Amino acid sequence: MGKAKILVVDDESRMRKLVRDFLVKSEYDVLEAENGQMAVDLFFADENKDIALVLLDVMMPVMDGWETLKEIRQYSQVPIIMLTARGEETDELQGFKLGVDEYMTKPFSPKILVARVDAVLRRSSPEGTKETIECGIIKIDTTAHQVFVEGNPVDLSYKEFELLEYFARNKGIALSREKILNNVWDYDYFGEARTIDTHVKKLRAKLGDKAGDMIKTIWGMGYKFEV
């Protein structure tokens, strides 16, 4: 298997070099873009159809991170990790609303960034035999990362899919927010409960009323998936 290709988008050349050096050291192929328009052009170029993940800055000239994210999400569910100096709650919530899979605030540890990249790619590239999980009207193809409700495909982001799969594998079990974060995000995440709540709200809406109602809220604790 060849090296995974990662697109690093940041208007600061020093930041791109720092991230690139750590990714290359971890045996990733790296493409660089200094603004959103360049990132979109690179992402949709025929020779880059194998881009496995995008690291995307928010504040950039020509086209900012939000517009870049919207452009990519119109056609692709490739995992996207947002890198930003803005740590406000509204920015983080906006990122998740638009389909971001991870959100890292600058300054950050390059080693932690690489660890998160490893985790995202490991989960987004399942190997082995095809596995299907069926929970009532929901069918989950874990190999193809596809979800069907009553036979109809449902378009989920990478993180929404992982969250639903985790619920399905633990149906009937009360799950705390901390446990969900540690398992779905695949590292010790020191975020707020709103991270889980935001994803659950979006997931319920995309699944529809009947399927979405399978995700039960346990007030003061977390969630339970009941078929």
Image (cartoon, helix red, strand yellow):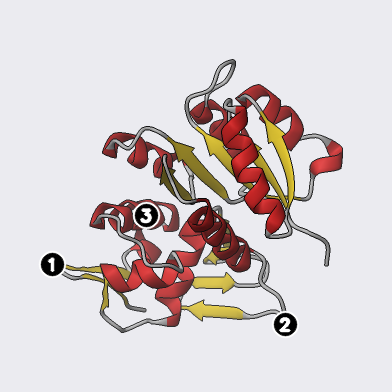
Left or right, 122 with respect to 29, comes to: left
Q: Earlier in the sequence, mark 2 or mark 3?
A: 2
Q: Which residue is mark 2?
A: 129
Secondary structure at numbered mark 1? loop
Of labels 3 and 1, earlier in sequence is 3
Q: Is residue 144 above or below residue 36?
A: below
- Please say whether residue 170 is visible from this viewpoint: yes
Q: Which mark is residue 193?
A: none
Q: Earlier in the sequence, mark 2 or mark 1?
A: 2
Q: Amino acid at mark 3?
A: His
The answer to whether mark 3 and mark 1 are in CB contact below 8 A is: no
Between residues 3 and 94, which one lies in front from this camera angle? 3
Q: Nearer the viewer, residue 70 or 108?
A: 108
Q: Which residue has dot 3 on it? A: 199
Q: Quadrant of residue 204?
A: bottom left
Mark 2 secondary-structure assignment: loop
Left or right? Give the position of 18 relative to 196: right
| Amino acid found under the numbered disc labelled 1 | Gly
Task: Measuring from the top left, give residue 200's x and y in whole percent.
Answer: 34, 58
Q: CA distance from mark 2 to mark 3?
A: 28 Å
The answer to whether any part of residue 74 appears in the image is no
- Which label number is shown at residue 220? 1
Residue 219 percent location from the top left of the image: 14, 67
Q: Residue at x 48, y 45 (%)?
A: 100
Q: Residue at x 40, y 56 (%)?
A: 203
Q: Position of residue 132 (x, y in %)?
A: 61, 79
- Of the residues shown, which amino acid type is indicated by label 2? Thr
Q: Determine whether 178 is above or below 156 in the image.
A: below
In the rendered structure, the answer to whether residue 163 lies left or right of residue 38 reads left
- The image shows residue 114 at horizontal and vertical percentages of 57, 57
Task: Say above or below: 182 vs 170.
Answer: above
Q: Quadrant of the C terminus?
A: bottom left
